Image: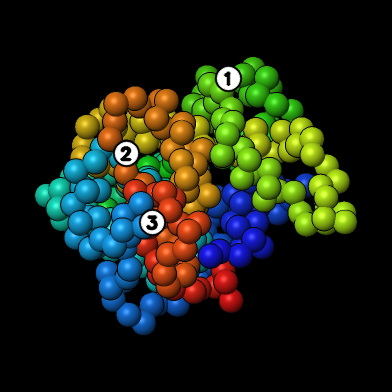
Amino acid sequence: MIRFHTWKTVLHAAIALAGAMLLSACASASRSEDAPDRDPRAVSVYRDGATPATWQEMVDACAAADAVLVGENHGHPMGLAAASALWEDILAKSSGSGTLALEFFERDEQVALDDYMNGVTDEEAFRKAARRTNSNYPPGHRSMVEAAKSAQRPVIAANAPRRYVRIARLDGYEKLQGLSPEQKRLFRIPDSLPTGHYRDAFNKIMTSEADHKDGEPEQTDFSHLDSSFRSQSLWDWTMAESVARALEARSGPVLLVIGRFHVDHEGGTVLALRQLSPGSEIKTVSFVNTDAPSDDDRNRADFVVFVGPGPETD
């Protein structure tokens, strides 16, 4: 079972903004990583988090889907290596077709990615243009990009630039709606905000244990979290729209690599993509940093991959 403080770390990394919270670690991978010491394909895979499955069964199901949403634990060496191996195997199964989309690049970095993928720039120039360092471009992400480059497949900068996410939090969507068409090309305002499990989980994680007194909640009105949830949802819808646009090109499965909270238990990005691309077959894969499933892992995703403890649980 993932500890409460670990879940909180994951979500704060997804929504925090400068001036009020930490800058998003979801928008740029959280740390450099060491190479894993075992075969990334030799991990435990469970269908729906409950029934044992093989790695190849997961690859086959994902390669046959329209979109695959991969939820990672940022900075986990084995998790990122396994996610990269999954992408490589999907490419091979799909005879070299497919599109890679990454949460960790913002839409205004697309030109830097395209220049590198098309050979206009070398890796050093790409890293400089896209502001990539060893801490925000770990080996697992780099290997995914390099696999796409070798297969001559596109890589999509899927996320909204943080300056617009900050506006969503501080000023609401109304200010974003008043921006120019060129600016609005860089983000997607949600059609609606989700309720139910996703919002409940968000509220729970964002309400610290310090908000409780004598075992009873001190604050049961979560309206104070609305501004943060607006920014979270802007990320979800922008990334979902990036995938939906790629699906329209019909160039093989689209694999989006994203923080796990956005995916788990029909997370916000999954919900948004189902609205933007109805009828598309979507598979979800969640990489969990434990060795074996628990009751909490049931229905976490179509496939749950257990990669063992890592930096997030040390």
Q: Tell me, yes or no, whether the two marked residues, 2 and 3, touch with CB atoms within 8 Å.
A: no
The percent coordinates of residue 52 (x first, y second) are 29, 62
User: Circle 3 sits in a helix, a strand or a loop, which is it?
Assistant: loop
The percent coordinates of residue 146 (x first, y second) are 30, 59
Image quadrant containing the C terminus = bottom right
Q: Which residue is mark 3?
A: 49
- N-terminal label among 2 and 1: 1
Residue pictured at 57% horizontal, 71% vertical:
313
Residue pictured at 65% horizontal, 24% vertical:
173
The percent coordinates of residue 152 (x first, y second) are 21, 49
Residue pictured at 34% horizontal, 48% vertical:
302
- Distance, label 3 to label 1, CA atoms, is 44 Å
Q: Is label 2 or label 3 in front?
A: 3
Residue type, mark 1 in image: Ser
Q: Tell me, yes or no, whether the two marked residues, 2 and 1, touch with CB atoms within 8 Å.
A: no
Q: Which residue is mark 2?
A: 282
Q: Is residue 67 above or below residue 139?
A: above
Q: Is residue 162 above or below residue 2?
A: above
- Distance, label 2 to label 1, CA atoms, is 32 Å
Q: Which residue is mark 1?
A: 180
Q: Is label 3 or label 1 in front?
A: 3
Left or right? Give the position of 290 relative to 91.
Answer: right
Q: Tell me, yes or no, whether the two marked residues, 3 and 1, touch with CB atoms within 8 Å.
A: no
In-front residue for pair 131/281:
281
The percent coordinates of residue 2 (x first, y second) are 56, 64
